[in-house]
Amino acid sequence: MIASLITGIVKLLCGANARWLGCAPELKPRIYFANHTSHLDAVVLWAALPASIRAKTRPVAAKDYWTQGALRRFLAGRGFHALLIERQNVTVRGNPLEPMLAVLDAGGSLIIFPEGTRSTGHEPKPFKSGLFHLARRRPGIELVPVFLENLNRVLPKGEILPVPMLGSVTIGAPVIIEPNESKAEFLERARCAVWNLHLT
């Protein structure tokens, strides 16, 4: 009920329906990785997925942001079922990769933002290493690039209330890590897979 309400509100505000250009929506474990310009990114991409896939997909979100205040905690926990991870005090015992791997191993999917923080530019910033380590640890999982457009105008940085604005969600062809590919090579190729979707 809560998830349906959030989905309806997000689509009313953003009008963001997914365009599946490089693959079809399938109910199987995947890692959807996207550019990051707004706090709405995770919710919009999650809401754009078909209901059956949405139910098995968890957006990975920053614990320090989504635990500030009762409303954010409620939305993250009861609304879009976010997987909250620590990004400030990461330790070996508190490795954020482990809960992500657990979701994939249980048959779920993830939404991640490899830039780490929101970008103020149009082109994605260099990706951090998390996507590479997930790909190495679970090579059978599809890595699906997504380009989100206009969401930074729906909820600009520093603003609290969203402004209705047409956004877009473009989903591309899965990326496969090559056996001898270096971390730097893979991350740049994955970043380009996201960025190239803005041309479609």
Image: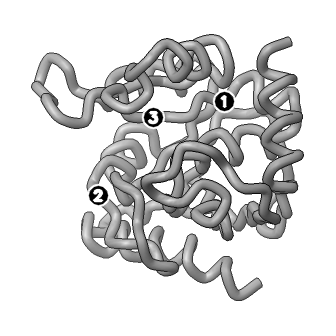
Place residue 93 in its image quadrant: top left
Q: Identity of the amino acid at label 3? A: Ala
Residue 14 can be seen in this image: yes
Question: SS class of the residue under badge 1?
Answer: strand
Q: Residue 33, image x and y in percent? A: 54, 53
The residue under label 3 is 61
Residue position marked by numbered label 1 in the rendering: 57
**Residue beneath the point at 42% across and 71% down:** 120
User: Is residue 121 toward the left or the right of residue 46 in the image?
Assistant: left
Of 56 and 41, nearer the camera is 41
Residue under numbered circle 2:
128
User: Is 175 left, or right, of 55 in this rendering?
Assistant: left
Callout 2: few (<14), some (14-19), or many (20+) C-alpha neighbours within 10 Å? some
Q: What SS does tag 2 mark? A: loop
Percent across and percent down for residue 151 are: 64, 61
Q: Does label 1 or label 2 sit earlier along the sequence?
A: 1
| Relative height, residue 189 to residue 42 (above, below) | below
180 shown above or below 84: below
Q: Nearer the viewer, residue 159 or 114?
A: 159
Q: Residue at x 46, y 58 (%)?
A: 157
Residue 128: quarter of image:
bottom left
Q: Residues within 10 Å of mark 3 (few under 14, many from 20)?
A: many
Q: Residues within 10 Å of mark 1 (few under 14, many from 20)?
A: many
Extreme residue in the bottom direction: 199
Vertical order, 42 against 113 (above or below): above
Residue 31 visible here: no
Quadrant including the C terminus: bottom right
Q: Amino acid at mark 1?
A: Thr
Q: Is residue 178 left or right of residue 159?
A: left
Q: Residue 65: image x %, image y %?
A: 38, 32
Asked which quadrant contains residue 199, the reply is: bottom right
Q: How is the image coloured?
A: one colour
